[in-house]
Amino acid sequence: MNIRIKNKTCYTKWKRTADVVLSAVALLLLSPLFIGISIAIQLDSKGPVIFRQKRVGIHKTHFEILKFRTMYADTPKDMPTHLLKNPDAMVTKTGAFLRKYSLDELPQLFNILRGDMSIVGPRPALWNQYDLVSEREKYGANDVLPGLTGWAQINGRDELEIPVKAKLDGEYVKKYGFWMDIRCIFGTIFAVLGHKGVVEGGTGMMQKRYEKKENGGRKNIGPQEILSGEKMAAHIYKAQKGQLLTEPKKALITGAGSYIGTAVRQWLSAFGGHYEVTELDMHGDAWRSHDFSKYDTVFHVAGIAHADTGKVSKEQKQLYYEINRDLAVETAIKAKKSGVKQFIYMSSMIIYGESIRPFHGRRRITAMTRPQPANFYGNSKWQGDRSVRELEDASFKVCVLRPPMIYGAGSKGNYQMLAKLAVCMPVFPLVHNERSILHIDHLCEFVRLMIENEETGVFFPQDASYADTSSLVALIAKAHGKKIRLWKSLAAFVRLASLTPGQIGRMADKAFGSFSYEMSLSEYTKGNYRVHDLKQSILVTEKGSQKQ
């Protein structure tokens, strides 16, 4: 037996007791769900509800694992999914849904109850996966009970090569104990219900990932009489048509296809031809030969944002500086030499560091707060921010925007994770925090005002009211006709997650920490860019998400 496991005998006994109690309670509470899933499987395709398969257990013994059947009954039984010729064609419609949310694994609670498995441990290998079993033997990973979820499971799942998967299982054995199990449990929750990428204010030039757009189980939202996007922009144009300058303004957006750039282009295009907008792809060298001299304003949104700054190579870090700083400066210099009057740079609140941890008060940025980036991403944005402002002179205005988290229909990052939680969870932790956020419509109108008024300086746009995570989730649920209960007792789990080292702790801090601008920093006297209140912003966001 592995020495690490042998020295943890007391914890192993305690863990087994917890497995029995938790699996029994879970089976009792989830029995209605088991019944519903069973009926859905039967209606979808012929065959048994439960799929049984021979797997490798502790000390390389064998047992029969239980799963809800997700494939057609004639699918080869003892072959890993990734080795099937066309696995997608063999998965039933119900099976695809069960796999997406890992609901097909629920019958393994019976395996846990009878001692074949644990809640946390290396995922049990197929009896004929000799290569995986052999690799695990090198790390002593065959000497613990296999689990419903595990360290390798939350770090790549089936995408991992066998040596990598076995090594991760070895890391679990090496760190075997209460805190490692807690990390795996919270990691599983975030992996299933949320995206792994958490980005605040990302602006574009990220690697594109092609995913199927699915409704994610959300209820349809009824029609709302709240204007948003291009319709709201057209409404503003109609109301302010007589106040706009007679000469149309020409704007170049450097960073084609970005979320922010596309939204701003569509917004400006709704102003009856008053703004002539062009998007420019900044990949490669072709942009350098583009004629900038015909534009009044260059709005620079090209940049890289990243969710997990703890897993980036030196080469990748350098790329952040090349894009967020060097490309921005080169673009600004070209704009200045071409006679462009105004350069708008999308910086970020991230230059001030990170949010304060949950339950540790609030962190509010004031006019006296100095930028203190906490990582290379924030530092690359700060260097870009500072460098482009040094180019300003009497004939070349530089306008820098430092927005907080940007959200809206189709946005990425924290908001989408919260939206998923809001529509599928009956309860949510009640944690009081304070966040500055910015709806995409508000950003678009703010950018328009910067162009229209030919502004220069540093600006801090944000919504008219602060958000706290729990209330935000409740508003999202309400937008879908659901009521979510906020429980103060669940705050203890947030506190525990925040104290957990690594990605889980960082994600908990991002979701429930406090990070805000002093509201006076965001006031703008030459126009009202806040066209919605918070409730309206959530409604139009969720309504728009239904159309994505």
Image (cartoon, rainbow, N blue to C red):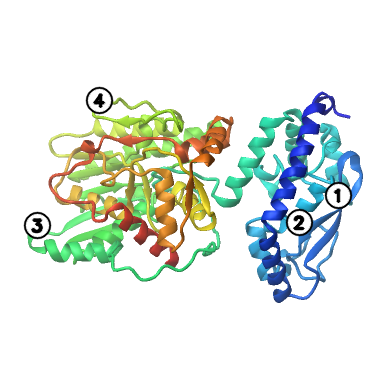
Query: On the image, which quarter does residue 369 sit in?
Result: top left
x%, y% of residue 111?
81, 50
Q: Secondary structure at mark 2?
A: loop
533 and 359: which one is in front?
359
Q: Earlier in the sequence, mark 3 or mark 4?
A: 3
What is the C-alpha distance between the residues marked 1 and 2? 22 Å
> Of the numbered discs in the image, which one, if any, rests on residue 245?
3
Q: Residue drawn at (69%, 49%), measured in percent from left and top?
A: 159
Quadrant in which the C terminus appears: bottom left
- Give the SS element for disc 4: loop
Q: Position of residue 90 (x, y in %)?
A: 74, 68
- Residue at coordinates 50% horizontally, 63% vertically from top-left? 218
- Which badge, 3 or 1, comes first in the chain's sequence? 1
Q: CA distance from mark 3 to mark 1?
A: 71 Å
The extreme right residue here reads 61
Precedes in sequence: disc 2 or disc 3: 2
> Label 1 belongs to which residue?
129
